[in-house]
Amino acid sequence: MRSQFPKIEKVVVQPFILRSQLYSSVKDRTQVDRDLESMKKEKVLRLFKLNTGQDDDAIMFMDDYLKQVATSVKRLGTKSQQEMQVFEWFERHIIESKLDVSINHQELLSLLSFGGEVKDNDVTLLINAGLLTRQLIDPNMYWFAIPNIGTILKGVSQGRKELLSFLNRRKYKEMLLAPLEKKRLRLSPLDMRFHLRDLIGSGHLKTINTPTGLLVRVSKY
């Protein structure tokens, strides 16, 4: 799935996979969750909570995430030595040791201070670089974030709606997979395969074997 991540013009984002997409390919969801947890502890990958209106988890390989962080720092165009140090501390003392999807303010400052003296605007710097986002419910908590992912997140949400709306307008709310995969979505930069895996894994769509091929149908909730 990583190798099949769509190439998107003008957006520099390393490939990521949604947990729901894994569920579409591996029937045993408990095993998926267990394996992800184990790979997270081994620092092979990182998990991120997405603010797409559903309980979505993005999965990114650690090497890809570190590349994404480096790109984000470059884009910020920071020149001062102090600012560059903050990013180094973040990489060395936080990415390496804090593997959860979130971190509280005190722990953030405490881990950063292993690098040196931490100032309030150092946290702002990390937020501006897209590495952290404040939680709305508790302003003392931050989500770890994938920088520069805004356009794609919008595409994930809009693509879901567009695909479900398209199928819901069809007579039996279904279509054969092969011709459906060839269709393009207007509101998402991601390809049809990305959205189909997501919606099948999250249970919004189901697949049925028929003599003419695999059929995709809207699930009845």
Image (cartoon, rainbow, N blue to C red):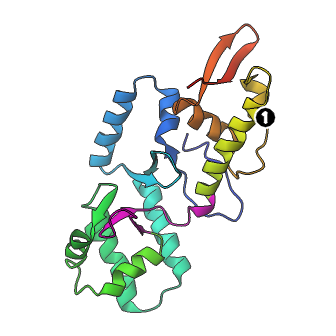
For image coordinates 44% across by 62% down, the residue present is 145
Q: According to the image, label 1 marks what residue?
A: 182
Magenta stretch bounds: 131-151
Please report the residue visible at 64 percent of the width from the left and 15 percent of the height from the top. Answer: 208
Amino acid type assigned to the residue bearing label 1 in the image: Lys
- The residue located at (43%, 68%) in the rendering is 131
- Binning the other alpha carbons within 10 Å of mark 1 as few (below 14), some (14 to 19) or many (20 upward) gives few
- Judging depth in this view, the residue of 133 and 58 nearest the camera is 133
In this view, the residue in front, 117 or 198, is 198
Left or right placement of residue 76 versus residue 5 in this view? left
Q: Quadrant of the N terminus?
A: top right
- Nearer to us in this view, 63 or 196: 196
Membership of 205 in magenta stretch: no
Magenta span includes 147:
yes
Give SS at disc 1: helix
For residue 138, what is the image quadrant? bottom left
Looking at the picture, how far across and down is residue 195, in whole percent? 63, 40
User: At which x and y percent is residue 216?
Assistant: 68, 23
Question: Can you name the residue that lies furthest to the top here?
Answer: 211
Look at the picture and state if 51 lies above or below 87: above
User: In this picture, is 197 found above or below 207?
Assistant: below
